[in-house]
């Protein structure tokens, strides 16, 4: 950790928004992860751009964090800067039938705001445990809907620290990927276009999807959400179940008995235990069915 770099971050954000050696287990839905050298809490797009410029000049690795879902942080932590865009940048505003959301806005809150305004098309996102920024990077989807279905444009910070507005038509959004991911852009805001609908019908659809999620997913345990991408022509959870791995454990890391597509933290699981379990699952499924599972969970730090 470099005190001069820390001072530069403090000059941009103020000392109360620069945390040193911050334990990442406090900021991930897995509740796993060692300390990040610098933990930064910007409140404005311009601050994000300035932080990236400092990291680039100092050749300091950086990582953009939302609410910490879909992420496994090494037990050794992260030797670099974690820039969190979450509650500190989570404003949602209505513009006719469009909603403009800062990257830190939870998808559940954006979905709820759409329902309050009688706007339909975003019900699918109500139960996705992530932020608008992460959704734009990964083209988040569930229950037959994807962000690309409603996205109009995103505002990003480039790796050079420049702000750009990119139309959705130029984002090449596919299954869990986009131009944003490929180029290493940082989403700071997104605009979605919805349609007028019946408020009661929208509410009922959201309740229905919530009931499905509660009944099928192990929400009572810390996890990173779906652990593996869906292989073409298969479902990861069923492959894992058919391989006899329901409830399989490595330490406190476990394949959920409720939904085999989830790896859960049953107590004090380490990142190494989760990594080993995932490797075991990949090897077993490959040997039994000839299908190679790819992690959907992102890894941060040294493994």
Image: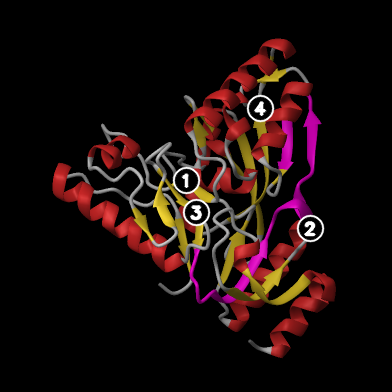
- Label 3 vs 4, first from the N-terminus: 4
Residue at the disc numbered 4: 193
Q: Is residue 177 magenta?
A: no
Quadrant of residue 12 in the image?
A: bottom right
Residue 44 has which mark?
2
Query: Is 23 in front, or is 63?
Result: 23
Write the residue at 78% across / 22% down. Answer: 116
Q: Residue lying farthest bottom?
A: 3
CB under 8 Å between callouts 2 and 4?
no
Q: Is residue 87 left or right of residue 177?
A: right
Residue at the disc numbered 1: 178
Write the residue at 44% across / 74% down. Answer: 302
Q: CA distance from mark 3 to mark 4?
A: 40 Å
SS class, disc 2:
loop
Q: Which residues are magenta?
A: 73-101
Q: Residue 62, how many percent across, how many down?
A: 58, 70
Q: Nearer the viewer, mark 3 or mark 4?
A: 3
Q: Nearer the viewer, mark 3 or mark 2?
A: 3
CB under 8 Å between callouts 3 and 2?
no
Residue at the disc numbered 3: 266
Write the residue at 69% across / 12% down. Answer: 197
CB under 8 Å between callouts 1 and 2?
no
- Asked whether residue 98 appears in the rendered view, the answer is no
- Asked whether residue 59 appears in the rendered view, the answer is yes
CB under 8 Å between callouts 1 and 4?
no
How crowded pointer 4 is (Cα within 10 Å; few <14, some 14-19, many 20+) is rated as: some
- Label 1 vs 3, first from the N-terminus: 1
- Label 1 vs 4, first from the N-terminus: 1
Q: Nearer the viewer, mark 1 or mark 3?
A: 3
Query: Is 44 in front, or is 163?
Result: 44
- Label 1 vs 2, first from the N-terminus: 2
Q: CA distance from mark 1 to mark 2?
A: 24 Å
């Amino acid at each position: 950790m470099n005190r001069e770099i820390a001072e530069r971050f403090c000059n941009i954000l103020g000392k109360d928004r620069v945390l040193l050696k911050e334990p990442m287990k406090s900021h991930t839905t897995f509740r796993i992860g060692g300390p990040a050298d610098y933990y930064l809490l910007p409140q404005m797009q311009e601050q994000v751009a300035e932080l990236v410029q400092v990291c680039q000049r100092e050749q300091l690795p950086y990582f953009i964090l939302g609410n910490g879902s879909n992420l496994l942080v090494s037990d050794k932590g992260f030797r670099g800067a974690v820039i969190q865009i979450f509650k500190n940048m989570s404003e949602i505003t209505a513009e006719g039938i469009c909603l403009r959301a800062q990257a830190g806005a939870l998808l559940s809150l954006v979905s709820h705001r759409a329902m309050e305004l009688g706007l339909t098309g975003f019900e699918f996102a109500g139960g996705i445990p992530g932020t608008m920024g992460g959704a734009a990077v990964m083209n988040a989807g569930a229950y037959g809907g994807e962000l690309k279905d409603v996205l109009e444009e995103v505002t990003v910070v480039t790796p050079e620290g420049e702000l750009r507005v990119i139309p959705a038509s130029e984002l090449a959004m596919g299954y869990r990927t986009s131009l944003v991911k490929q180029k290493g852009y940082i989403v700071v805001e997104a605009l979605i276009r919805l349609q007028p609908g019946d408020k009661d019908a929208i509410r009922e659809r959201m309740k229905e999807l919530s009931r499905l999620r509660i009944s099928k997913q192990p929400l009572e345990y810390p996890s990173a959400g779906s652990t593996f991408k869906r292989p073409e022509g298969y479902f990861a959870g069923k492959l894992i179940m058919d391989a006899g791995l329901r409830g399989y454990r490595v330490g406190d890391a476990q394949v959920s008995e409720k939904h085999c597509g989830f790896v859960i933290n049953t107590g004090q699981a380490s990142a190494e235990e989760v990594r080993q379990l995932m490797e075991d699952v990949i090897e077993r499924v490959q040997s039994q069915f000839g299908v190679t599972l790819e992690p959907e969970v992102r890894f941060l730090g040294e493994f």
